[in-house]
Amino acid sequence: MAAEKLIKVKSSGKWEGGLKTSISIRNFSPFIVDEPRSLGGTDEGPNPVEYVLGALSSCTSVMIAFIAKEKNFSYQGVEFKNDGTLDLRGLMGVEGVSPHFQNVNFEVIFKTDESDSRIEELKEEVEKRCPVYNLIKDAGVKIESKWYKI
């Protein structure tokens, strides 16, 4: 087994009132995390779990690029669609109800001439190595993942 090669990832946040938080990461402009009005927020930004779904898409995109290069997998484009289901009772503290996603549906749509078996091979490797995918999976969330080409 190879020696550990650890990196530290950081962020900071500042409460902006109500349910809104400004998040800073590295030297990028801060971004707003908020809740929709229906949950008491001002809807000035995506909520935390929407960012998790966005992180799943972007992390998968990065891993596809890395692994496609390793496997000589050619593609001209890739798009992502996902949704997750939460039981709001978990957020309200109801005993025995998890506050995180119950399930996540995830579609990865390629523009490629590669075969379905090559797409499946790439899918298996990405799902094995993608940090955000594994964070969600290891939390016990059921992930329904479909990868296909158009």
Image (cartoon, rainbow, N blue to C red):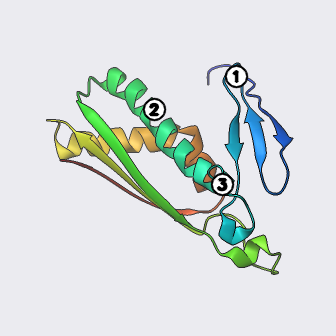
Which residue position holds label 1? 4
Q: Quadrant of residue 40?
A: bottom right
What kind of residue is marked 3?
A: Asn
Marks 1 and 2: CB-CB under 8 Å?
A: no
> Helix or strand or loop: what does disc 1 sit on?
loop
- Measuring 69% from the left and 59% from the top, which residue is drawn there? 35
Whole-angstrom CA distance, mark 1 to mark 2, is 19 Å
Residue 31: mark in rendering? none
Q: Earlier in the sequence, mark 3 or mark 1?
A: 1
What kind of residue is marked 1?
A: Glu
**Where does residue 7 sit, x and y in percent of width and height?**
71, 22
Residue 32 vertical placement versus 74 (above, below): below
The answer to whether residue 8 is left or right of residue 80 is right
- Measuring 53% from the left and 46% from the top, which residue is drawn there? 54
Residue 63: mark in rendering? 2
- Measuring 27% from the left and 34% from the top, which residue is drawn there? 77
Residue 47: mark in rendering? 3
